[in-house]
Image: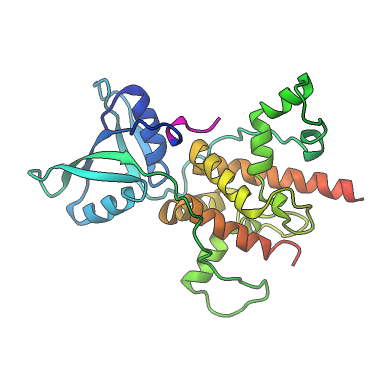
Amino acid sequence: MFDESQTSNVPLVAELRIRTDAAQMDDVVTQIAKAFELTLVSAETPDNEHLFTITPRKPPQELPGISVIYVAANDTSPVSPKKLRSMICNPAYAGLEPYTPSLVDDELWISAAAMLARREGVEQFLVNMLYTLANHPGR
Amino acid sequence: MSADKDTLKRMTRQLELVLVLYEQKNTGKSGTKHFAAKLSQVDRDLPALSAKYIPPKQIFAHPPGFTDDFLDIVTNPNVMWSLFGNPMYTGIADFTRLSPDERWLRSASLLMREAGIEQYLVNMLYLMRRSIRDWLRYKE
């Protein structure tokens, strides 16, 4: 049931034309480069349009390290970016009765968690999720 | 994005790991797909549940051997979902650990890459809650 492209030796190649606000172009390319190797086909295009050939990157061989911190349930210190990241990647906040009550609805948690997974990568998200979860329910 | 049909399908799935895509219909050109893309979108519809819960007791009930029951279990995609779409089986809370963290993480990442991020998370929440209900009933 897994993607054959992950075992196939034939590289997948496609052309990708990006049209966006010129000020956002670098950020868009950086985000796409997390999943693809990009080669600029033609630089003779307007600032808001670039054409690339792209080929998918393979999933990382090594799992990334944990990049979140443990946030205790009774922690009242100010919210920091690291703490916020720990909370977003923890499904316990969506509610795992009777271990943990729901603090946000499923749609909101899934949308926030998916955004984090896209920013940080699938493997990084799962590593962090497992860490936060292991330190949460029933504690 | 331009490529042959099969490549387009795979590349789109990969692109969805870093961007939320909205396919623009009726662009009129074969081998080319047009998308609007965002990093996130909070109010969009989530995918419907696509996994069924199979209790571990049922998965591991059949000793290895090419019996019909065993083959039914090992070829059932819901078995993969039930084991690797549910982090509770890494020994979360008072659950029995069925998989080392690393094995679970590697399998879960393949499943998430294949199914899509939102689809994985929708299924995961369901499978976690369903297994907790089962586990609490078993403990009573």
Q: Residue A118: percent from the left, percent from the top?
A: 43, 51
Q: Is residue A132 above or below residue A16?
A: below
- In screen coordinates, is A49 left or right of A115? left
Q: Is residue A52 above or below residue A10?
A: below
B103 or A97: nearer the eye? B103
Q: At 33% from the left edge and 33% from the top edge, which residue is drawn? A: A12
Left or right of A51, for residue B16: right
Image quadrant where one finds the C terminus of chain A: bottom right
Q: Main secondary structure of the magenta part?
A: loop
Quarter of the figure with the N terminus of chain A: top right
Q: Position of residue A10 (x, y in %)?
A: 35, 30
Residue A122 or residue B100, whichever sits in front: B100
- Would residue A89 be seen by someone viewing this image from the given angle? no
Magenta stretch containing residue A23, yes or no? Answer: no
Residue at image location 9% in from the left, 43% down from the top: A45
Q: Image quadrant of residue A100?
A: bottom right
- The residue depicted at 33 percent of the width and 34 percent of the height is A11
Range drawn in magenta: A1-5
Residue A121 seen in the figure: yes
